[in-house]
Image: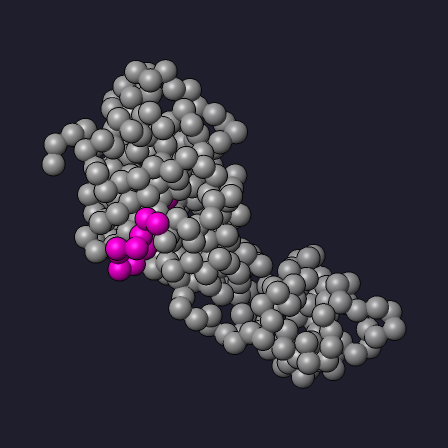
Amino acid sequence: MTGIQDIATPRRTKEIIQRHGFSFKKSLGQNFLIDQNILSKIVNAAGLDDTKGALEIGPGIGALTEKLAQSAKVVTAVEIDQRLLPILEEVLAPYEHVKVRHGDVLKLDLREVFAADFADVSKVSVVANLPYYVTTPILMRLLEDKLPLENIVVMIQKEVAERMAASPGTKDYGSLSIAVQYYSEPELVCTVPNTVFIPQPNVESAVIRLRVREVPPVEVVDEKHFFEVVHAAFAQRRKTISNNLKSRFFTKENRDTLEPLLQQAGIEPSRRGETLSIEEFARLSAVLLEAGIS
């Protein structure tokens, strides 16, 4: 295939930016990758082949898009910054199986996108260098919408990646860990120095792969209630599970009923939320629901 290759080098990236008179918008969290090795690790982690599709969020000037185009049958890239559209049209011209959509991924009807763009592929993965300021809203939208995804492989802030993959009893474990692990199996792929971006971000980065689960790891009767219990348990990390739940779900009149319910769920009232496994949260939610506590 002929055409522009290897966008992700310092020289090529600077040349494209200068030729188009592009200026970075800090408000959009724009940091372009300039390292071929990191790009390869991202694409390899997605497990793409010529039967699969890739959805990219925030393609920038197309460095990752180009690598995805060389691995997947169909690629759709969603870009919010209209100024980047002519650049993407130019650099991705050799790849007829790449579509660029202009819009905000948080506002798009993603089911319509999947139906229109990925009807002829076996599986779809999201692969992206995400803007750090909207990482969590984007990932939770992808997971909560229960889209037909195989993997989500994203470059995000290292601190956030560590929270997503954290185990019970660790300092990074919290409501985000449980939410992500309810819908997927997270695995840190690699850490990434800030020197591989233009401009360089002020934080460390990491690539994480979320293998999207076909079914959650625990049976939950009411997902909304389950996550309300989880969020309540972490409302104040230094407080016990008993005190946090009392603040959220109980009045002075019925607080005495909580400790027996915790015992019924097999949870000591003196424990903190960060020590509870996802299985224990599911059990606790079920006990509270059965007792009419919601």
Q: Position of residue 104 (x, y in %)?
A: 48, 39
Q: In the image, is residue 162 above or below residue 252?
A: above
- Check if residue 122 falls in the magenta segment: yes
Magenta residue span: 116-129
Quarter of the picture holding the C terminus: bottom right
Quarter of the picture holding the N terminus: top left
Q: Nearer the viewer, residue 112 or 240?
A: 112
- Check if residue 224 falls in the magenta segment: no
Residue sitting at 42 percent across and 41 percent down? 130
Q: Position of residue 227 (x, y in %)?
A: 61, 64
Q: Nearer the viewer, residue 80 or 264?
A: 80
In the picture as drawn, the residue positioned furthest to the left comes out as 1
Q: In the image, is residue 180 above or below residue 79?
A: below
Q: In the shown orientation, is residue 42 left or right of residue 261?
A: left
Q: Position of residue 67 (x, y in %)?
A: 24, 41
Q: How many marks?
A: 0
Q: In the shown orientation, is residue 226 left or right of residue 153?
A: right
Q: Nearer the viewer, residue 144 or 204?
A: 144
Residue sitting at 73 percent across and 73 percent down? 293
Q: In the image, is residue 119 above or below residue 155?
A: below
Q: Nearer the viewer, residue 264 or 129?
A: 129
